[in-house]
Image (cartoon, rainbow, N blue to C red):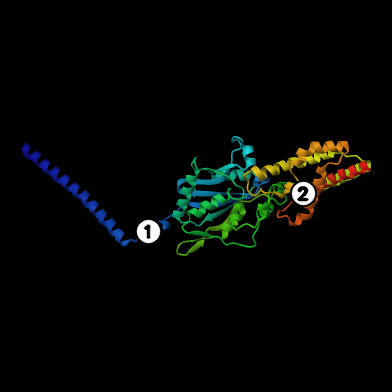
Amino acid sequence: MLNSTILLKFVSVFFLSITLVMNIYINRLFLLLLLLTTCLVVPAQNPDNESDSTRISLLTCTPGTEIYALFGHTAIRYEDPLKGMDIVFNYGLFNFGAPNFIWRFVKGETDYELGADQYKRFIRGYLQEGRGVYQQTLNLTKAEKDKLYQLLVTNYHPENRVYRYSFFYDNCSTRPRDKVEKSVNGNVAYAEETPRKSFRDIVHECSKGFYWDQFGMDFLLGPEADRMITYREEMFAPFYLMWAFDKAQIVDQEGNSRPLAGDISVLEEPVLLESSGTLFTPLRTFLLLFILISGVTIYGIKKKKSLWGIDLLLFAGAGLAGCIIFFLSFFSEHPAVSPNYLLAIFHPLHLLALPFVLYKESKGKNGIYHRLNLVVLTLFIVLWPVIPQYFNPAVLPLALCLLIRSASNIILTYKKKA
């Protein structure tokens, strides 16, 4: 009886196991058939049409009051709500604490780098400065967004993030543009506008009202800044890039086109910038200096006094300014600073020849230096309209100051001989 009971339990367990195994395989077979049926009935999905919660935008920040912020700024914003990501990629970072930063900056060897920061922290800095921020959502497919994001992430690797900054040709505005162009499936077609502008035209637009900053940039930029540039080259300025993106189209290989970016939206309203002041502009200041030096020079000629102290200050200042222009023209990698025809007025020879010139003046002797300087300055002023370089109007009274001092010394020499 006991053996019959054991045998019955064994048979029951055996059949139960067989039933369970069969159920498992039947379920799997049913699921496989269901998947096969689905594949046959439902068409394949296009990855670009899948639900995509990510958004990539071009951010354009309004100018600040510091000279390096007068042109505004550009960055790329990446948002993925599902992952809680809101990151800003920023090509405008530089390190003041880097070894020999000032010296390398003067030589044009400034290294910038790509930074990545949380959007809230990025925007907070601009709010504190009263600067506005505009956003353009890029009209990219999911594949293009993924490619752009990977380009930025790869560029952010420590070995890739540093680049040699070039104000007109490779900066925080041109880098985002280049990355967007590389990510699209096709080409970006820009709606080019005329007439063309020069680098200096855009510099003047961005520095309007900041007279001393504008004078300093005009003083250092040579004729390269005055050539008519292409529509693409205009995008070195952040707002020109924003306007270009607003009208640009993505054209694929089949010739189909779509807008590159959506409408421009305001994330933060800008505070109205205040200029650096209008009372003592460079032109007014140097005109006043010219009037003072003219009056003192006339007095010196009447009294037959050389007034060498004025020449010491004036020619030493012109010589120091000339050293800066000379260095930038011949030793710096900065774009558009060489050549610079202002070297005809401001050059290191003023500084080098100053001891000999003052010695001649003290002895009442006629020196050749003042004669040469008078000829060069006269030719420069006469040929001013045809020289292929824009000169800030404030340069003219400075040139006249040097001219009348050389002329007065020549006149005094002849008066003393008479």
Given residues 120 and 378, the one toward you in this image is: 378
Residue drawn at the location 47% of the way across and 53% of the way down: 145
Q: If the image is split into quadrants, where does the C terminus sit?
A: top right
261 sits left or right of 395 in the view: left
Report the residue that reaches farthest toward the bottom: 255
Give SS at disc 2: helix
Do residues under tags 2 and 1 come within 8 Å of each other at their CB atoms? no
Q: Amino acid at mark 1?
A: Gln
Please tell me whether residue 44 is drawn above or below residue 22 in the rendered image. Answer: below
Please tell me whether residue 36 is drawn above or below residue 305 in the rendered image. Answer: below
What residue did someone put label 2 on? 395
40 sits left or right of 4 in the view: right
Residue drawn at the location 37% of the way across and 58% of the way down: 45
Q: Amino acid at mark 2?
A: Val
Given residues 358 and 210, the one toward you in this image is: 358
What residue did someone put label 1 on? 45
Q: If the image is split into quadrants, where does the N terminus sit?
A: top left
